[in-house]
Amino acid sequence: MGGESHLQHHWQGVLSSALDAVGHTPLIKLDRIAKAEGLRCNLLGKCEFLSAGGSVKDRIAKRMVEHAEKEGVLIPGQSIVIEPTSGNTGIGLALACAIKGYQCIITLPAKMSLEKEVMLRALGAEIVRTPTEAAWDSPESHIGVARKLQKSIPGGVILDQYSNPNNPLAHYYTTYEEIMYALKTSDLPRHDIALLVAGTGTGGTITGLGRAIRDYETSLVNGEASSHARTTILAVDPEGSILGGGEPGNYQVEGIGYDFFPEVLDPNPPVVDKWIKTNDDEAFAATKRLIREEGLFVGGSSGSALSGTLRYLHSADGKSIAEDEDANVVVILPDGVRNYMSKPWFLETSKRPVKEDEEQKEDIKDTIK
Ligand code: PMP
């Protein structure tokens, strides 16, 4: 895949800045969930919340900024970074801008969490909230407002994650390489991916990973190819988004689904084999399972990805992978619950019936006696 390996910087010695701690996230076995679901395959989570800015989007923010600097599009001391985002690309960009000294303006639909806004402000970014229900191509949407701002602000640059090739390329080079390296150096019987699952927002993650996987498969010569799984690539999309089919509508999960097809998304085979729709309830229930059963501090779209994965593995199509104890299933877990601590779906987790509390107090008293 050419160029210097991203892995050469895998946390060796002292890092130059937080930007060097972008990516390099662990691939972790989800054994308890796999067992409870009766799966024999190896269910593995790619833990993107452990990246420096807390999400999968740090990778594209870093790559888009560094590329724009090289091209002379971003000029230190002059340029102002403006970007429409559901929050995580904004956090990644604001982190890069804080370190590199650029001003940063983020346009963010109203639905996105207060935690994301607070984090963005803490990184020094300015925020403009836009109506969630505005169609993507209307002047009021987060995309429309960003474009308007760019026209009126001298030095304003939109890196545009929806069309920037560095979005999928960040995953083509870094996310893919990390997953393959983790598998190759693991104690698992096979080192290939039987099933890859990712939620889709811009589609950068699934497109970049999908292309890297297919290019690798194509590069294999006969003998190697026959012993290598052809990876099934599954895209997960919330009900209310049009990407995986269906009508546009409301849903609470953040960061995935749109009312238009972003330019960087390649939604068809060979990149994406199959689309699966998920709803909020199953996504939030699966998020809580990842926290409670696996100790992983993930956000809502990680639950969407897991619930889509389980749906597929329990279907007729997924049966052969589900029952194969050598098969590796990789699920991208895009961000952390840090972004959603005040959301009702997460706060509910801490609620217990009053009686249970009273009983517990009595138990504690008895124990102390
Ligand atoms: N989950 C979350 C929480 C996100 O912020 C995003 C990015 N919008 C995604 C999933 C989807 O990533 P991508 O844009 O690469 O499709």
Image (tube, rainbow, N blue to C red):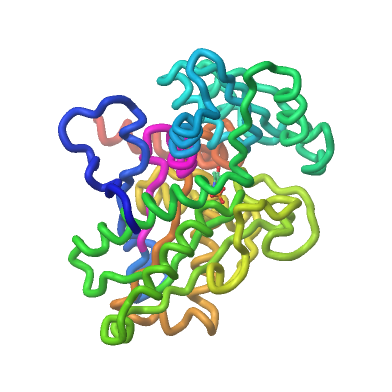
**On the rendered structure, is 238 left or right of 365?**
right
Q: Residue at x 33, y 69 (%)?
A: 42
Return the residue nearer the eye: 29 or 293: 29
Return the residue nearer the eye: 60 or 361: 60
Return the residue nearer the eye: 30 or 348: 30
Q: Is residue 20 visible?
A: yes
- Magenta stretch: includes residue 46: yes
Q: Quadrant of the C terminus?
A: top left
Q: Residue furthest left?
A: 13
Residue 241, percent across and down?
A: 72, 55
- The magenta segment is 44-61
Q: Residue furthest top?
A: 77
Q: Quadrant of the N terminus?
A: bottom left
Relative to 194, say whether 278 is above or below. Answer: above
**On the rendered structure, is 300 left or right of 134?**
left
Q: Residue furthest front?
A: 72
Q: Residue at x 35, y 47 (%)?
A: 295
Q: Residue at x 75, y 51 (%)?
A: 259
Q: Is residue 354 visible?
A: no
Residue 331, percent across and down?
A: 43, 60
- Magenta stretch: includes residue 145: no
Occupied quadrant, residue 329? bottom left
Residue 87, percent across and down?
A: 58, 34
Return the residue nearer the eye: 299 or 73: 73
Q: Say how many tags the image has.
A: 0
Q: Residue at x 73, y 58 (%)?
A: 242
Residue 307, percent across and down?
A: 53, 62
Relative to 183, say whether 94 is above or below. Answer: above
Relative to 299, say whether 310 is above or below. Answer: below
